[in-house]
Image (tube, rainbow, N blue to C red):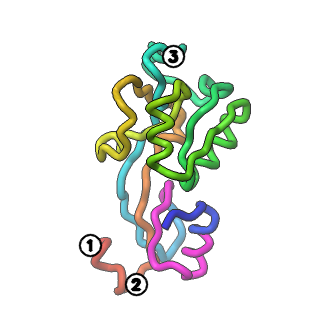
Amino acid sequence: MVADLPATEQALRTNACDIAVLPYRPDDQGLRVRHLMDEQLFVCVKRDHALAGRTSVTLDNLNGFNFLLGSDLGFWSDLCRNRLTASKLLVQSDDFALAEVIRQSSLPCFTTDVAVRMRYRNIGNSRVSIPIEDPEVNVSFYLVAHDSPKIAKLFG
């Protein structure tokens, strides 16, 4: 289940959930924490787009361009809304529809190194992926749980 970050943090604090994945390493006492994975965000643009020749970009460079975006992206959605304030976000809730619109549109979209490795979405080969440099979009994820015998095996 994808939940927003504040709801996930609250559920963990109140013991409403046993285990959570967080995009930061919490330092609360009584929690077991294990590094899960790192993920880097990329912007995908058509090969003739103004940004296509760049080796990297920042969110400030992207602000003002309109984007195709999936829904239910957790904190990524909030980050886009908060940092791309001059951009319009065309949000698609259906993954098939999003992939189809990406293939047919010239609007930029986003992907991650993890999604690319997993071949999560086929958006064709007419786009280039450019890494985004901002530290808040290059995230380490952590498996977090209350220290108990119930979860001890997950944390070795």
**C-beta proximity under 8 Å, tags 3 and 1:** no
Q: Amino acid at mark 3?
A: His
According to the picture, the residue beneath numbered tag 3 turns out to be: 49
For mark 2, give the secondary structure: loop
Find numbered disc 3 in the image and state the secondary structure of the residue it sits on: loop
Which residue is identified by label 2? 148
CA gap between label 3 and label 1 equals 48 Å
Above or below residue 60? Residue 53 is: above
First in sequence: mark 1 or mark 2? Answer: 2
On screen, residue 15 above or below 55: below
Q: Nearer the viewer, residue 101 or 76?
A: 101
- In the image, what residue type sits under mark 2? Ser
Of the residues under marks 3 and 2, which one precedes in the sequence? 3
Could you tell me residue 10's position as x and y percent? 62, 72
Residue 121 sits in quarter: top left
Q: What residue sits 38% from the left and 23% below the top?
A: 126
Q: Are marks 1 and 2 in contact (CB under 8 Å)?
A: no
Looking at the image, the residue that sits furthest to the right is: 86
**48 left or right, relative to 118:** right
Identify the secondary structure beneath mark 1. loop
Identify the residue under disc 1: 156
